[in-house]
Amino acid sequence: MINEGYVVAGYLITFLGLGAYAAWILVRGRRLSAKVPEERRRWM
Amino acid sequence: MTQTTTTVTGAPAHTGSRGSRIVGILAAVGAVALLVFALVLSPADEIQGEAVRLLYLHVPAAIGMYGAVILLGVSSAMWLRRRTRGWDVLGAASAEVGLVFTGLTLMTGMLWGRPTWGVYWVWDARLTTTAMLAILLAGYLALRRVPASEESRARRAAIAGLLVVVDLPLIHYSVNWWRTLHQDATISTTDVKIDGLMLFTLFLGMVVAGLVLTWLLIHRFRLAWLEAEIEEGGLDRALAERRAEAEVSA
Amino acid sequence: MLADARLVAGKDLRIERRARVATNQVAPFALLVLVLFAFALDPDRGILDRATAGLYWVAVLLSTVLAVQRAYALEAADGVPDALRLSGLDPAAVFLGKSAALGLQLLVLEALLLVGVTVLYTTELAGPALLAATCLAATVGLAAAGSLYGVLAAGLRVRETLLPLLLLPVVAPVLIGATRAFEAALAGAPGDGWPWCGLLAIFAAIYVAFGMLAFGPLMEEL
């Protein structure tokens, strides 16, 4: 792999990885929020 | 344990809020700017070539990693002092987000190392300690997942969290001393002749990392709080309370 | 407090004497590790000689994990943790006592392993003072960390897989330091090794201090 290949791979994995992680958190957040009564959903 | 929580009436059915949205937008805008600067506007390095562009991810990822670990230590210590769920949940969130950043640090570091040093890995103090941190965080998260009462789990996690933070400098110092004895100099990722634009891009990267870290922590914290609520059967208790109220008023 | 510590240590050692876990299970395992290394590294190629220090301490570390697991499994079966909590003993004293008992067992294991490498790897035990000091300093650290994590993981049913994952990274500095010290001793250059021994002593102090502080909260629920 020439240098550019490594760079592209690095940026792709980083952004896709973080994006996937963020999406996962948001989706689970919605799912769990629905299960908890409104008053008890937040810390502050 | 009975938790007197400050609750918000009418919280929405998701983990977002105005604050998190602002941080998120700033992070997204910053990320786009970073892409432009890192991949297009900033120059390639004389020695490292295009590979230097990976440092605009690697160093910020490491900063995020340090931030998360510090937060883990602080929240672990604070839980032991205050014993409130918030600190425990913050520890859980910091550890997981921290592990993500550690993985990114290692991955970008390896992808940078291959074209620059010719190898994916060297046993220098910083890389080795980062790898150990990944394992330590994985162990911490595994401990958190063992079924136990909320208080019991929080207590073990707090001690384990502190141990992670305490152990990190020990590992770094001993590995550093060991490797410098063998004349394997710590290859620094900052062996870069930094020109103004590159420095700016690096700085931009760190700011974006901070924003992304904050956004992830806010959401992960709220998610973990919800998980704790559900696990503790807060739902059941609330229903039971309401049933009891209904009976009294009936 | 020292009297209480001695009390706890005595109890732990008496339990061990009756159960003989260390002698019956951990010691053979330690020797087995030495043998397996010989199988893997081919005694005739000189690798074993060069790697003796490291292999020795890896064997010690793996044996430590086993010893800690069995020690706390035995205890939990007898309902000892509750008794300890209700006894009103100072948690720090309990920690010191448990660490001392574990440490003593580890020292015996290390002595056994020294005999093992002398016989199996035909190692010449040069620099005995450094070897002994290293074993002592390393053992204090291992015993402290082992007791701490043993209690941390106590009562959890996944203890068997979780304990190694938690304990071994934390004692990695001991592995680094002890190996370097042993290498120096065995190579006839103990001057290089004593600083590492000093480092081990610092680690030991840190782990002991942490353990004394952390045992209080940990014992609240045992």
Image: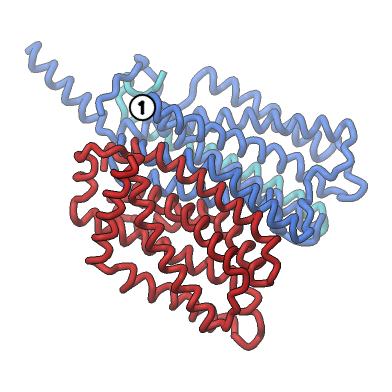
Q: Is residue B47 above or below residue C121?
A: above
Residue B69: x and y in percent read 56, 37
Judged left or right of residue C114, residue B146 is: left
Q: Mark 1 lies on which chain?
A: B
Q: Which residue occupies the extreme bottom position in the image?
A: C44
Q: Quadrant of residue C94?
A: top left
Q: Nearer the viewer, residue B83 or B33?
A: B83
Its colouring scheme is: by chain
Per the image, label 1 sits on a secondary structure element best described as: loop
**How many numbered marks have been drawn onto this rendered protein structure?**
1
Q: Is residue A12 above or below residue B82?
A: below
Q: Which of C56 and C73 is in front in this view?
A: C56
- Which chain is cyan in the picture? A
Judged left or right of residue B61, residue B86 is: left
Q: In which quarter of the image is the C terminus of chain A?
A: top left
- Which chain is red in the picture? C
Is residue B65 in view from this perspective? Answer: yes
Judged left or right of residue B244, residue B99 is: right
Chain B takes which shade in the image?
blue
Residue B131: x and y in percent read 60, 52
The residue at 45%/45% (across/down) is: C208
Q: In which quarter of the image is residue A16?
A: top right
Q: List the residue tagged with mark 1.
A: B83
Residue B27: x and y in percent read 65, 28
The residue at 53%/70% (across/down) is: C56
Q: Amino acid type of disc 1?
A: Arg
Q: Is residue C199 above or below residue C32?
A: above
